[in-house]
Amino acid sequence: MPRLHMICGLPGSGKSTLAAKLEAELPALRLIPDAWIARMNEHGHKKGKRKLVESLQWDVAQKTLHLGLDVVLENGFWSKQERQQYRRQAAAVGAQTKLYFLNVSIEELKRRLQARNKNLSGDTFYIDPQKIDSWLVEFEPPTSDELND
């Protein structure tokens, strides 16, 4: 049975690193919103662009899952509602889900973002480490029942 691997965490938590590892080990199709957004010469936190890219990637993911292949999404999955919605939709195409939560301290997130900003690749863009504080208000960490599914 195919599986949707959902990677949850804030910027700098290691989502891309884990997703690349899963892609190689499983194998699976890895869909990276930041890479698509960066290639459009856009900033990744424009709500409209991010939602559009994530929607397009979800269309591809559903078709891939329906074909019986695993998919890795590193969308961040900031809310419980969003995580539940993806789980329901994955089940509708006959796929299981697994949620990975990358819980990293605020200080470490800021350190990682500073390092990332010094070595930007074509698939990334600048992220202000100071925005982490405001994003914590929006971020809803997964509960233990979500991680045990």
Image (spheres, helix red, strand yellow):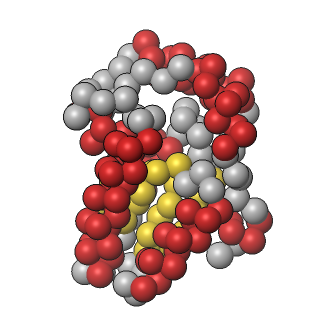
Residue at 59% over, 40% down: 10
Side (left or right) of 35 relative to 104: left
Residue at 30% over, 38% down: 37
Residue positioned most to the right: 144
Residue positioned most to the front: 48
Percent position of residue 8, x then y: 57, 52
Q: Is residue 13 above or below residue 97?
A: above
Side (left or right) of 147 relative to 121: right
Percent position of residue 61, x then y: 32, 67
How many numbered discs, if any? 0
Residue at 65% over, 76% down: 149
Residue positioned most to the top: 118
Q: Does residue 23 show up? A: no
Q: Is residue 45 above or below residue 113?
A: below
Residue at 55% over, 54% down: 77
Q: Is residue 109 above or below residue 81?
A: above
Q: Does residue 138 show up? A: yes
Between 106 and 51, the residue placed more toward the observer is 51
Between 45 and 146, the residue placed more toward the observer is 45
Percent position of residue 102, x then y: 63, 47
Q: Is residue 109 above or below residue 79?
A: above
Side (left or right) of 112 relative to 2: right
- Quadrant containing the N terminus in the rendered view: bottom left
Percent position of residue 93, x then y: 37, 84
Side (left or right) of 88 relative to 92: right
